[in-house]
Image (spheres, rainbow, N blue to C red):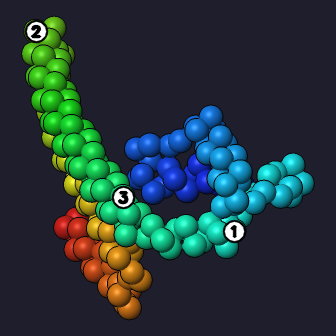
């Protein structure tokens, strides 16, 4: 990989919660090269790094240590994601309450000014229901992605997992759509 690909890969391992800078990655790669653990070559304008046999041996000799670090990182990312999700959910609840209060105030102001308010409460209710449904879908998506990544970290996903998701989510979509029929 070239340095930027390594940055992206590490960012992905941390679930986007930490993305190392070029100032972190390239000096480390230089040190690994000095120690004979990686080599670098030029591919056009890019410098490509490749692990050496000595690097593979070093990884293998430290496998249990690396597995422990990976487990700790996974747990940390999961905890951070849960905290962020909780914080966002709390913020959305507060926002919904603020919007409902603003809608009530707007309705009261419109009544005081002699304007009709027939459609406003219904529109606010519909928007609140839509926002809540979208929050539920997003929360489900994030939780399921975290579950799938955890499963994939332990090995290949079970046969049929994707088809199960496709069929069950299709059934849920059909059921939701049938509510308006």
Q: 173 or 159, which lies in front?
A: 159
Instruction: Tell me where residue 71 sits by quadrant.
Output: bottom left
Q: 33 or 117, which lies in front?
A: 33
Instruction: Tell me where residue 116 sits by quadrant.
Output: top left
Which circle's residue, 3 or 2, is located before the other in the chain? 3
Residue 112 disc label: 2
Picture residue at 65% right of the left edge, 40% below the top: 27
Instruction: Tell me where residue 62 sits by quadrant.
Output: bottom left
Picture residue at 48% right of the left edge, 55% below the top: 12
Residue 52 disc label: 1
Picture residue at 41% right of the left edge, 63% below the top: 66
User: Which secondary structure, mark 2?
Assistant: helix
Quadrant where the image shows the C terminus: bottom left
> Badge 2, how many Cα within 10 Å: few under 14, some, many 20+?
few
Where residue 95 appears, x then y in whole percent?
20, 30
Picture residue at 87% right of the left edge, 49% below the top: 45
Which circle's residue, 1 or 3, is located before the other in the chain? 1
> Badge 3, how many Cα within 10 Å: few under 14, some, many 20+?
few
Quadrant where the image shows the N terminus: bottom right
Residue 86 left/right relative to 44: left
- In this rendering, the answer to whether 136 lies above or below 92 is below
Residue 25 left/right relative to 78: right
């Amino acid at each position: 990989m070239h340095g930027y690909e390594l940055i992206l890969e590490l960012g992905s391992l941390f679930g986007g919660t930490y993305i190392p800078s070029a100032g972190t990655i390239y000096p480390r790669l230089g040190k690994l090269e000095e120690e004979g653990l990686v080599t670098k070559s030029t591919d056009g304008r890019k410098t490509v790094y490749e692990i050496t046999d000595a690097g593979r041996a070093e990884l293998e000799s430290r496998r249990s240590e690396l597995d422990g670090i990976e487990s700790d990182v996974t747990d940390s990312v999961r905890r951070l994601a849960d905290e962020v999700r909780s914080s966002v959910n709390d913020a959305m609840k507060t926002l919904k309450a603020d919007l409902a209060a603003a809608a009530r105030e707007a309705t009261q102001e419109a009544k005081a000014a002699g304007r009709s308010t027939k459609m406003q409460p219904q529109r606010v209710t519909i928007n609140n229901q839509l926002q809540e449904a979208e929050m539920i879908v997003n929360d489900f998506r994030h939780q399921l992605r975290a579950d799938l990544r955890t499963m994939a970290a332990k090995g290949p996903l079970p046969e049929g997992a994707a088809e199960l998701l496709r069929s069950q989510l299709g059934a849920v979509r059909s059921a939701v759509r049938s509510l308006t029929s």
